[in-house]
Amino acid sequence: MTEPTYSRKAAAAAGTKSRIGQRVAELLPEDGSIFIDGGSTCLEVARAVLDRPQLRIYTNSVTLLQLAAEGRANVYSIGGEVRSVSLALVGAFALSWLERLRFDAAVIGASGLDAEQGATTTEIAEAAIKSEALKRSRLRILVAHSEKWSKPAALRFSPWSAFHHLVTDRAPPRSAVAPLAAAGVEIHLLSSS
């Protein structure tokens, strides 16, 4: 699977991703510390919570860092090397900072979803960041546009059991219903309005 550029991903289903972001914002605290992953759907979550002045947002998203001045939340970079195709910060420096942090919630994106195995991504350095952020979070939310079901990527970064919530626009395929239920994942679908 060849990973599309960030700009291509951001343009795809932009309205749906914005609605996912609004729905996820309802699950997040008004104050506290949260991690928001890189990726176009995660950026929409950030847009929905940037005006919460008591919120501390930690991120590996270059695009979220560019938006930081537009909101009232405190935004912190975890540092690292910029991965140009995804505009995400990755690498040993980013991981070493993550190891020092704890989050009330983490919002994580995925390149693909595998009905049996869980959330997948295309690149090992991004997989490491996602896995570490999940380990350090009390509430773990996966955000994904439904098109991700048809395109699982090569690297599984997390089984379904690592997540409390999946926020998406359409119901998962039948083959994923039992594994998600067995893992205790609560599925939040966008309303059809």
Image (cartoon, grey):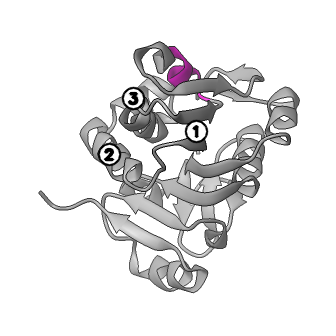
Q: Position of residue 33 (x, y in %)?
A: 62, 42
Disc 3 to disc 2, C-alpha distance: 13 Å
The residue carrying mark 2 is: 22
Rendered view: 175 above or below 108? below
Which mark identifies residue 51? 3
Q: Position of residue 67 (x, y in %)?
A: 46, 18
> Which range of residues does the magenta coloring cover?
61-66
Q: Quadrant of the C terminus?
A: bottom left
Say which element carries label 2: helix
The residue carrying mark 1 is: 2
For image coordinates 46% across by 29% down, the residue present is 53
Q: Is residue 147 left or right of residue 77?
A: left
Number of marks in the image?
3
Disc 2 to disc 1, C-alpha distance: 29 Å
Depth check: 115 or 63 in front? 63
Task: Return the disc, 2 or 1, that comes first in the chain's sequence.
Answer: 1
Depth check: 25 or 179 in front? 25
Say which element carries label 3: loop
Kind of residue sitting beneath label 1 = Thr
Confirm whether residue 87 shows in the render: no
For image coordinates 45% across by 81% down, the residue present is 177
Examine the structure image and report whether residue 140 is included in the region drawn in magenta.
no
Whether the residues at callouts 2 and 1 have beta carbons within 8 Å, the answer is no
Q: Position of residue 161 (x, y in %)?
A: 65, 73
Kind of residue sitting beneath label 3 = Asp
Mark 3 Cα shell of 10 Å, populated few (<14), some (14-19), many (≥20): some
Q: Position of residue 98 (x, y in %)?
A: 79, 39
Whether the residues at callouts 1 and 3 have beta carbons within 8 Å, the answer is no
Mark nearer the viewer, 1 or 3:
3
Kind of residue sitting beneath label 2 = Gln
